[in-house]
Every structure is written in structure tokens, then in C-alpha cells.
Amino acid sequence: MLNKFKICDLLGIEYPIIQGGMAWLGTCELVSAVSNAGGLGTIGSGDAPTEWLRQQIRQTRERTDRPFAVNIMMMSPFLAENMKLVAEEKVGIVTFGGGNPGQYLAGLKEAGIKVIPVVSSVALARRLERLGADAVVAEGVESGGHVGETTTMALVPQVAGSLKVPVIAAGGIADGRGLVAALALGADGVQMGTRFICSEECIAHTRFKQHILEAGDRATVVTGVSTGHPVRCLQNKLTYQFATLEKAGATTAELEELGRGRLSLGVMQGEIEEGSLMAGQIAGLITDIKPVKVIIRDIMAEAEKVINDMAGHRKG
Ligand SMILES: Cc1cc2nc3c(=O)[nH]c(=O)nc-3n(C[C@H](O)[C@H](O)[C@H](O)COP(=O)(O)O)c2cc1C
């Protein structure tokens, strides 16, 4: 029943499931596993140097011959070089996080690259569709990492109702129920981050994965609103220090200094109190570490069952 998705035709994938680009964690291991399992894997370039990204693209190609994407952060110090690289390497699909990539769309389209920006408002979604975006990811405030203000539940139907191009829902989705809910809201597919961290293939530190497994529904917090770049993470000593400084009126420079280097400390080195543990509110729903293939298979099977059960409710 669940087998005809226009997003799958657009991206050349089997299932309407995208692994969101994640700084440090969206590496060739996870990306190729997701693409090989029929979803779309995404390399997370974050603020890594362009040469790192080139190697990741090449290593991903060694591990899969299926489509994958590269995520580029608008705040990256290597933004201009990364833009050149994706054209040089003939990457098929580019997604953008952390800002408005409008000025780059025409160039990427000319190079034959499909462009999928991540948006948190209808206005930006509309503007980027006009500029040629092939699809958008509508990402709600439940998400891990950089966030907007509107919930997935409210944002997705408003974006879907305003655009002609496909809309991918992100933020707070980790199982088949989430996929069906997103489709019901008008989305064409889903993007997940936190669920894929708890996969066998993700290179995240075991202590970080374990922390997600132990998280409850209120385990995350958003900090950094005063800097204009709010971020959702699991609460720990660092988020407490950050929030305290923010309340005391610290400058953006002081807050950036506190945050420097913390993401790799948390997610790669497993420093659970001192590091930044970006993760979404759906962490509370995740209780196991599974191979990517099983994650995707279980989501599709559960979605199918949920739809059948709903049809049953109607008859009853
Ligand atoms: C550890 C982590 C790092 C992330 N890094 C990026 C990034 O570099 N670029 C980006 O566009 N989104 C980034 N995201 C957001 C994800 O791509 C995805 O949209 C989000 O996790 C979806 O919400 P979920 O966590 O509720 O599934 C990150 C998320 C996490 C958890």
C-alpha cells in the first residue's frame, strides 16, 4: 500500500525516509547504510574543512552506488569552497541547514544538482520554491540541533499547503506512527536525525547513544535564542552553564566562546556533561540501537499497520 511516493521518484530512492545531515555524525558509514537500505543518506559537512567533505563524498561512493545527499551549513567558514566542491564532485542532491541559501540555488541548478533547503517558516519555503528548490524540509522546533519556533504539527501542513514542490517533514519523527502522521499533514516523506544516531552504523560515541536511550520526554532544552541561533540538546552541565550566562546577558561572542568545540566533545568523545549533545525531543521514544536497515524496515512495516488499523477503526 505504501509504495508510491513522488519524493522517491524525485530522489531515486525506495522509501520516503531521509537521514538528516548531521555535523560530525553524517559520515560515509551512516550515509551509505541509509542509502543502501533504500532511504537517502546525507553527509553532514557542518563546519568541517572542504577536503574532509571531498574524502567523505568519495568514501561514500565506494560504499554505495545509490543516491545520497550532502548537507551544507550556511554558517560554515568553508561555505564558498564547499559550494564549488559539490559541483566539481557532481553530487546529485544538496540540502542546506542554518539559514537562507537563496543566492546559491541558481548556480546549483545550473550544475544539475537537486536542491533541498531546510526551512522553519512558510515565507522562506515560498521564497526558495520561487528560486528553484526541488523540495523543502519543513523542520519543527522538536528537532535536534538548530531549530526554528514552530512545531512540526503546525508547520508541515502550512508549508505543504503553500508549495507545489514536495515537502519533507522533520522534527519529532522516529517510527511508523510519525511517518503516517507526517503524510497525513501533507508531507511527501520524512527526515530523521535523532533516530539514526541510535543506529549501529552511526559513529557517535556509545555514551552519547546510551544517553539518548535513557532520555525521557523532557530531556532536551533549547539554548542560544539570544544569539539568533537556537539549538536543541540533551540537558547537561553545559546547557545549564549556557542558559545561566544567557540569562545574565552575556554577549554572543562570550556564548560562542563557551560553545566552541563542544559538539565533537559530546557526540564523538562522549563527554556527557561538558560536551554538546544535540538531539531532539523524540529521544524519549528511542529505546534501542539497531542496524539502519532494520530501523527503516520497522518504520515502513509499522506505518503500513497503522494505516490498516485506522481503516479498521472506521469500519468499527
Ligand atoms: C547531532 C545533530 C547534528 C545535526 N547537524 C545538522 C547539520 O549540520 N545541518 C542540518 O541541516 N541539520 C542538522 N541537524 C538536524 C537534522 O538533520 C534533522 O533535521 C533533525 O535531527 C530532525 O529532527 P529529529 O532529531 O527530531 O529527528 C542535526 C541534528 C542532530 C541531532
Image (cartoon, rainbow, N blue to C red):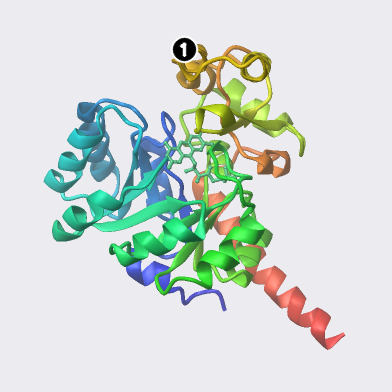
Q: Is residue 12 visible in this depiction of the protein?
A: no
Q: Residue furthest bottom?
A: 315
The picture places residue 30, in percent across and down from the top left corner, at 42, 40
Tell me where residue 192 appears, x and y as whole percent: 53, 49
**Residue in view at x 17 percent, y 54 percent:** 107
Q: Residue at x 71, y 77 (%)?
A: 308
Taking depth in this image into account, of 93 and 212 the one nearest to the observer is: 93
Please tell me which residue is depicted at 25% across the width and 35% down the height of the picture. Answer: 79
User: In terms of secondary structure, where does tag 1 sit?
Assistant: helix
Residue 272: x %, y % from top left = 62, 16
| Point 42% across, 40% down: residue | 98
The quarter of the displayed image where residue 224 is located? top right
For this view, does 281 lie left or right of residue 15? right
Up the image or down, 315 lies above or below 93; here it is: below
Residue 316 placement, left or right of 285: right
Considering the image in quadrants, where does the C terminus appear?
bottom right
Q: Mark 1: which amino acid?
A: Glu
Q: Is residue 169 visible?
A: yes
Q: Nearer the viewer, residue 233 or 173?
A: 233
Looking at the image, how many numbered discs can be counted on the residues? 1
Q: Which residue is mark 1?
A: 257
Q: Quadrant of residue 154?
A: bottom right
Q: Where, by quadrant of the figure, is residue 313 drawn?
A: bottom right
Residue at the right extreme of this rendering: 316
Within 10 Å of disc 1 (Cα), the crowding (few <14, some 14-19, many 20+) is: few
Q: Position of residue 278 (x, y in %)?
A: 56, 30
Which quadrant would the N terminus be assigned to in this image? bottom right
Establish whether ligand 1 lies closer than 8 Å to the Cβ of label 1: no
